Image (tube, rainbow, N blue to C red):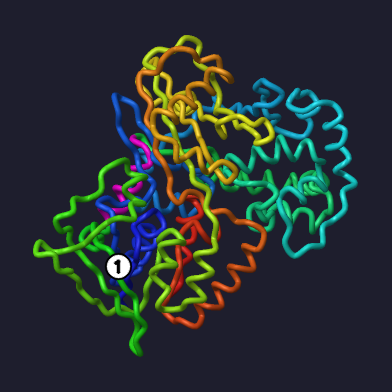
C-alpha cells in the first residue's frame, strides 16, 4: 500500500510517521522549504521564540508514546510550577483567576453580584438545542457578566474567537456532557470529582503530568525529530498540483523543484502560508511528476484543501472553504534586563474590555530556559475573530500597539531589546455553531471517495495534542 500525505505541518508529519511505523510506504509533499507548517522555533540573541504553539499539555498516552519512540523524553521541559498563576484583565486591572469554585468566593476577579449569580448555577436548566453557541450555554449556567469576562477569556486563550459564534458542542464537548448527565456543571464536578481525581492519578502514574510541556530547544525539536525519522520520504519545496481518482486509487501530480523564483523569505509562520509559490523549470516550463497511490491524506489548512479538492468534489470543497479562520499575530518582546518582571503564566483580555491585544504570555517566567538568565520574554497575541484587521498592521504599527498595551496593563515603560512579530494566516480555525453538522457532511462526502482522508486542526481539535492523537488513530 502506498500513501501520499499532502502537507508537512504537525498533522501531516505525525500521520506519516504513524503510517511508517506500521510498515506503510508513505511519502510527504510540502510546498514550503521547511517542515512543521506554522509550528517551529526561532533562536534570537539567546531567546527561543515559538512561531505557533508554546507547548502542549502532557496528558495523552499517544503523545508520550510518540516522544519515547523518537527518543525525546530526556529533552522534555515542564512549566515552572511556581509560575502557574493566570490573570484576567478586567475593570482596569489584572485579577488572578481562581483555581477552583471555592477559591472564587475569595477572589476579586468578578464582583459579588456575579459570584451570587454563578452560585445559582446549581439550579441551571438543561439545554435542548442540537447545537448552541458558547455564549448562550455559558449565560444559562453562570450569567451574562461571568460569560463576558471569565468564559470569554478562557476561549480567547484557545480559539481567539467570539463566544456568540463558537459552538459549545464543538469547542467544549465535556461541558455539554456534564450538563447532559447532571444538569448543573457544579453538581457534575462535585459528583464526578472523585473519578476525575482517580483518572488524573492514573495518568500521572504513566508519566502523564497534565502540565504544560515543551522541549529544551522549543517545539522545533519535535518537528526536526519527525522530519529526520521520515528522511527521504519527506519532500520539501514540492507542491501537489492536482488530485484525480482512478479505478485503482489516486493519481497525484506534483511539481517538485524551484525554478527562477527563490523560496519564500520571512518567518516560519509566514513561509508556511505563502500562497505565491511558483514551481517552474529554468526554461519557464512546468516540471511535474505524476504518482499513483492507494490513499491520499490532505493535511493542509482547509482553504488549501478546498482548492486541491475542487476538481474531485466541488461540494466537499465548498464545505471546506466555509470553515472560518481567525488571523493571529504573535508578537515576541524581549528585554535583557527588566526591573520587576511579572511572574506567573500570563493574562487574557476579554473583548468587553476593548483593549488592543488578546493577552500576553510571561514566557520566561514559566519556561525560564526560553530566555537568557535575568532576561524577560513576553509573547503578546493580537487579532482574533473580532479584530482580524490588526494582524494586517505593518511591523512598526503592530509594535507600537503592543508596547502601548504592555505599558497600560503591566506598567512596562522600558524600550525592549527586540520585538519580532509572527503572523498566522489563515490562523486558527473557528468551530462555530454548525461545525459538527458540517463535519457530518464532510464525513459523508469522504465516504464517496475511498482512499481520501483529511487531517489537521480544521476538523476535530486545534491543538498539537489533538493532531498527534488523530494521527495515531488514523485508519486506512
Which residue carries the number 1 mark? 240
Q: Residue at x 41, y 78 (%)?
A: 312
- Is disc 1 surrounded by few (<14), some (14 to 19) or many (20+) residues within 10 Å? many
Magenta highlight: main SS: helix
Most extreme residue toward the left is 283
Could you say where residue 22 lies in the image, as x and y percent from the top left?
35, 68
Q: Which residues are magenta?
A: 217-229
Q: Is residue 228 magenta?
A: yes
Could you say where residue 286 lies in the image, as x and y percent from the top left?
18, 69
The answer to whether residue 54 shows anywhere in this view is no
Q: Nearer the viewer, residue 123 or 100?
A: 123
Q: Is residue 324 above or below residue 340?
A: below
Q: Nearer the viewer, residue 216 or 248?
A: 248
Q: Residue at x 82, y 62 (%)?
A: 128
Q: Residue at x 32, y 36 (%)?
A: 42
The answer to whether residue 183 shows anywhere in this view is yes
Could you say where residue 430 lies in the image, as x and y percent from the top left?
57, 53
Q: Quadrant of the N terminus?
A: bottom left
Seen in the image, is 330 located left or right of residue 172? left
Q: Quadrant of the C terminus?
A: bottom left
Q: Is residue 354 magenta?
A: no
Could you say where residue 157 lies in the image, as x and y percent from the top left?
58, 39
Seen in the image, is 197 located left or right of residue 367? right
Q: Is residue 100 above or below residue 289?
A: above
Most extreme residue toward the bottom is 247
Total tally of numbered discs in the picture: 1
Q: Is residue 252 above or below residue 320?
A: below
Q: Residue at x 43, y 45 (%)?
A: 424
Label 1: state its secondary structure: strand
Amino acid at each position: 500500500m502506498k500513501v501520499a500525505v499532502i502537507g508537512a505541518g504537525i498533522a501531516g508529519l505525525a500521520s506519516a510517521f504513524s503510517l511508517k511505523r506500521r510498515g506503510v510506504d508513505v511519502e510527504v509533499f510540502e510546498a514550503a522549504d521547511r517542515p512543521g507548517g506554522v509550528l517551529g522555533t526561532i533562536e534570537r540573541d539567546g531567546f527561543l521564540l515559538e512561531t505557533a504553539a508554546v507547548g502542549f499539555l502532557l496528558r495523552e498516552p499517544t503523545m508520550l508514546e510518540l516522544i519515547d519512540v523518537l527518543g525525546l523524553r530526556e529533552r522534555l521541559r515542564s512549566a515552572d510550577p511556581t509560575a502557574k498563576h493566570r490573570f484576567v484583565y478586567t475593570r482596569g486591572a489584572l485579577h488572578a483567576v481562581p483555581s477552583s469554585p471555592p477559591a472564587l468566593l475569595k477572589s476579586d476577579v468578578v464582583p459579588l453580584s456575579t459570584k451570587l449569580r454563578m452560585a445559582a448555577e446549581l439550579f441551571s436548566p438543561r439545554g435542548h438545542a442540537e447545537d448552541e453557541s458558547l455564549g448562550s450555554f455559558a449565560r444559562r449556567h453562570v450569567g451574562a457578566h461571568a460569560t463576558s469576562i471569565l468564559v470569554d477569556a478562557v476561549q480567547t486563550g484557545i480559539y481567539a474567537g467570539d463566544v456568540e459564534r463558537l459552538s459549545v458542542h464543538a469547542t467544549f464537548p465535556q461541558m455539554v456532557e456534564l450538563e447532559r448527565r447532571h444538569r448543573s456543571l457544579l453538581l457534575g464536578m462535585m459528583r464526578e470529582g472523585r473519578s476525575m481525581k482517580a483518572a488524573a492519578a492514573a495518568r500521572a502514574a504513566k508519566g502523564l503530568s497534565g502540565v504544560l510541556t515543551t522541549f529544551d530547544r522549543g517545539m522545533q525539536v519535535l518537528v526536526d525529530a519527525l522530519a529526520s525519522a521520515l528522511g527521504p520520504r519527506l519532500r520539501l519545496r514540492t507542491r501537489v498540483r492536482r488530485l484525480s481518482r482512478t479505478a485503482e486509487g489516486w493519481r497525484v501530480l506534483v511539481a517538485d523543484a524551484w525554478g527562477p523564483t527563490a523560496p519564500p523569505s520571512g518567518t516560519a509562520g509566514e513561509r508556511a502560508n505563502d500562497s505565491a509559490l511558483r514551481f517552474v523549470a529554468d526554461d519557464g516550463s512546468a516540471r511535474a511528476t505524476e504518482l499513483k497511490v492507494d490513499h491520499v491524506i490532505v493535511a493542509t489548512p482547509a482553504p488549501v484543501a478546498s482548492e486541491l479538492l475542487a476538481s474531485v468534489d466541488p461540494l466537499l470543497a465548498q464545505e471546506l472553504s466555509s470553515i472560518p479562520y481567525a488571523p493571529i499575530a504573535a508578537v515576541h518582546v524581549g528585554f535583557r534586563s527588566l526591573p520587576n518582571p511579572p511572574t506567573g503564566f500570563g493574562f487574557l483580555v476579554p473583548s468587553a474590555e476593548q483593549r488592543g491585544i488578546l493577552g500576553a504570555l510571561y514566557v520566561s517566567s514559566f519556561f525560564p530556559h526560553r530566555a537568557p538568565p535575568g532576561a524577560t520574554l513576553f509573547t503578546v497575541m493580537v487579532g482574533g475573530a473580532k479584530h482580524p484587521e490588526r494582524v494586517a498592521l505593518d511591523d512598526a504599527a503592530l509594535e507600537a500597539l503592543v508596547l502601548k498595551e504592555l505599558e497600560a496593563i503591566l506598567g512596562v515603560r522600558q524600550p525592549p531589546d527586540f520585538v519580532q512579530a509572527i503572523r498566522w494566516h489563515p490562523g486558527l480555525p473557528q468551530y462555530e455553531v454548525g461545525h459538527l453538522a458540517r463535519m457530518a457532511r464532510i464525513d459523508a462526502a469522504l465516504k464517496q471517495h475511498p482512499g481520501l482522508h483529511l487531517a489537521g486542526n480544521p476538523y476535530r481539535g486545534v491543538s498539537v495534542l489533538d493532531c498527534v492523537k488523530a494521527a495515531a488513530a488514523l485508519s486506512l
